[in-house]
Image: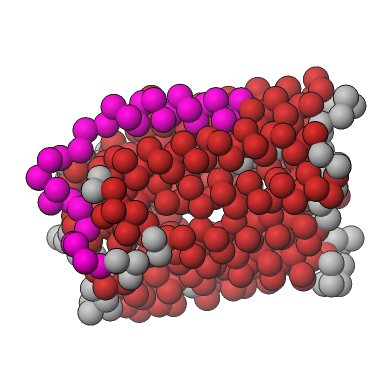
Amino acid sequence: MKDGAAWALMCGFADTYAVPFAMALGAGTMGIGVLRSFPSLASSAFQLFTEKLVSRLGSCRRALLLMVMVQACSLFISACAVFLPAGQGLRLFIAMAVVYAVAGNMAGPPWAVLMGEYIPASKRGDFFGFRSQVVGIIFFSGSFVASQLLGVWQGRGLWGFFLVFSAAGVFRLISFYYLAQMYEPRTRFHMPPAGLGVNFLASLDFRRGRVPALFFSVLVLLFSTYLSAPFFSVYVLRELKCDYTRYMVLMSVGPLMTYLFMRRWGQAADSYGSVKILKAAFLLIPTIPLLWTFSRNFWYLAAVETYSGVIWGAYLIGMNNFIYESIPAHSRTGYNAFFSFTNGIAQFGGALAGGWLYDRLPQLWGSAFVVLLLISAFLRGLSVIPLFLLVRETRSVKAVGPVELLLFMSGFKPLVR
């Protein structure tokens, strides 16, 4: 929980303001596409080495701590981009964004393996949901504090960004301190099989159709999402001309609602099944970019982002529980790495394609971004097909219809186990 609090502050300071920092360093639309795509590509490539790193170090905890320290260092070096000329500073910042993303993604699988052994199977959704609520509140608070720092230092060069990213590095060091206290089972039953080397695919068993079908749906969904997602910041700052406080609200209220509702989604997944929660998410996610096209009003867009956060919470908790339910402990490092690999490839392709399209699409209602949103919505809708046709629950769960699930999420229906 303490690690999660420090991690949330790091993300609230660094992740939320990466694009504004890059824009302040002189990045254009294509530069933002590169910033949001190349870290994903590098992360995908290095996921191939995650299992080898864990095996070589002989410990999930050691691998986790190494990557967390690398990530902290990348934030301190990113802050130093303010001391370089604009072009060199931007290149340094993008390079450190790659290191930040690679280290963060490689830390994920060993952390997930350790956490999977701490929590009883029947309580995973509930615990991760509760932890996410705490993380969400702290993330939102961190984003707000960072926006105020940037506002105070606005007009005085890039010193605000230096403070924000240096603080993010400090928060990651605090996270490192608490992660160092995690317990790792001495039996090593959770470790990946020896002798796999770099080819973690050798540990994956795709004979059952539900896993590749779901990963393909995820690939399509995230590619479609990242066609537009990296450029919401550009749209909000450049076209809507929001100040940092309003920008913070639009960029943070979604993640806040994701975290706040994840416990409720987790309880639903524990009782009704992770696949049912995933299907609800995949059906509703395509509506989010459509809603963004209807108005430029700040309060309307904040409401859309609130809705978006709730829906993405279902996706995240559904995927988390599905992997724990479907994959044995010794294979989870490989599967989590492959899932991150899938995510990274989708993000790279989507962000790069979106950056190329943004400046070439015709305008609709005064903005090319609106057209990009419509394309993203259509492609997101296609991602539901493999999921609905091939993916089934892996355990016996209580039957529930859409209305009952909605009533439960709204608090009008108690959980029935």
Residue placed most toward the observer, 239 or 337: 337
Q: Quadrant of residue 346?
A: bottom right
Residue placed most toward the observer, 112 or 393: 112
**Residue at left offset 39%, top offset 48%:** 108
Q: What stretch is highlighted in magenta?
A: 167-196
**Can you name the residue that lies furthest to the left here?**
187
Q: Position of residue 241 (x, y in %)?
A: 86, 42
Q: Position of residue 199 (x, y in %)?
A: 33, 70
**Residue at left offset 76%, top offset 26%:** 160
**Residue at left offset 31%, top offset 41%:** 62
Residue placed most toward the observer, 145 or 168: 168
Q: Where is residue 181 in the image (x, y as percent from the top left)?
A: 29, 27
Q: From this view, report whether residue 227 is shown above or below residue 181.
A: below
Q: In which quarter of the image is residue 132?
A: top left
Residue 376 left/right relative to 122: right
Residue 211 in view, yes or no: no
